[in-house]
Image (cartoon, rainbow, N blue to C red):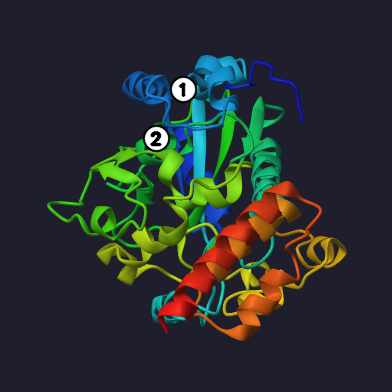
Amino acid sequence: MPSLSEAHTPGIDFTALAQRVKAWGTELGFAKVGIAGVELDADEARLLAWLEQGRHGSMDYMQRHGTKRSRPAELQPGTVRVISARMNYFPDGVDANAAWHTLGEGERAYVARYALGRDYHKLIRGRLQKLADRIAAATGPFGYRAFTDSAPVLEKALARNAGLGWIGKHTLLLDRDAGSWFFLGELYTDLPLPIDEPSTAHCGTCTRCIDVCPTRAITGPYQLDARRCIAYLTIESKDAIPEDLRPLIGNRVFGCDDCQLVCPWNKFAQPTREEDFAPRHALDHVKLIELFAWTENEFLKKTEGMPIRRAGYAGFMRNVAVALGNAPPSPEVIDALNARVDDPSPLVREHVAWALAEQTAKAAKA
């Protein structure tokens, strides 16, 4: 990573350079690129209030970062602009109807669409590095640092300010022409590029994302309680899932897409052009019993280079156990759960015991 130094600016037409940066970004596979300033005072106030309310759950790192998340120059000294880029990830040929169908099949696992293929972090950082290299070839050495969900960055607020979309009532970024199925990445830079106009909001009176949330984690427009969010419960949290929330998780074993699947703007979403984001190991419709039979070595091998690794083996088995507890009653499910009643992980054992009790109760009613 190059050290920040004063850019050699004499003779550079920054308006023309900004247009070239956007064109280069498109050539590198980004759907859109924009440029934002670094003023995030209002967003910082909302972030601090959210943290004060404890809605970040066990994500203590969000407090430890202090104001670096909302003050780019504190994270990367010398930053005066942020080049924000987005890349589509919804797999080609895997439509929203297929996602709903999987959610409706209780014996199958639902994995968030972003996690079906390769981990996006390295891919996007690599493209951002190529973008930085092209900029350097035009300007000479300049200060920059690339991010993609890899450091304390208010990426959605910066993307909004760069004109890439507005923050919807579900707290995700939305664009009128692209919906929300995309990743974000940033180049913090010391180049004084012209700033784009921020996006305006177009959610109107729609509350579909709020109404559909299985655990009521979206407590109101633009308000998310991570402690109830299925993405947090199945990925970020390393603890036991609260018992009152387990039945609401259904068959979602890694993340949740309901608020995106129901959003009207996603009818304009475009499938990704990146083959690396295509589903691996049939994870877009795999059976829960099959996942629950994975050994730790199988888990590590089959999730290599994938976002699912983030949950860890015990965490992923915890999630699958909950989904099996929510599955339609069957002898096969009971057998799968019984095979893990003595699992080495106390976390897994606890959720297996819960799932067996749920299955037993449902079988008694059948």
> Which residue is rendered at x = 22% and y = 45% of the image?
201
92 sits left or right of 274 in the view: left
Q: Secondary structure at mark 1?
A: loop
Residue 320 visible, this angle: yes
Residue of label 2: 157
Please tell me the numbered disc located at residue 364: none
Image coords of residue 1 (percent x, y): 77, 30
Q: CA distance from mark 1 to mark 2?
A: 9 Å
Q: Are marks 1 and 2 in contact (CB under 8 Å)?
A: yes
Q: Nearer the viewer, residue 220 or 260?
A: 220
**Three-letter residue code for mark 2:** Ala
**Quadrant of image for the C terminus:** bottom left
Image coords of residue 179 (percent x, y): 35, 61
64 sits left or right of 4 in the view: left
In primary-sequence order, the first of circles 1 and 2 is 1
Q: Nearer the viewer, residue 223 or 358?
A: 358
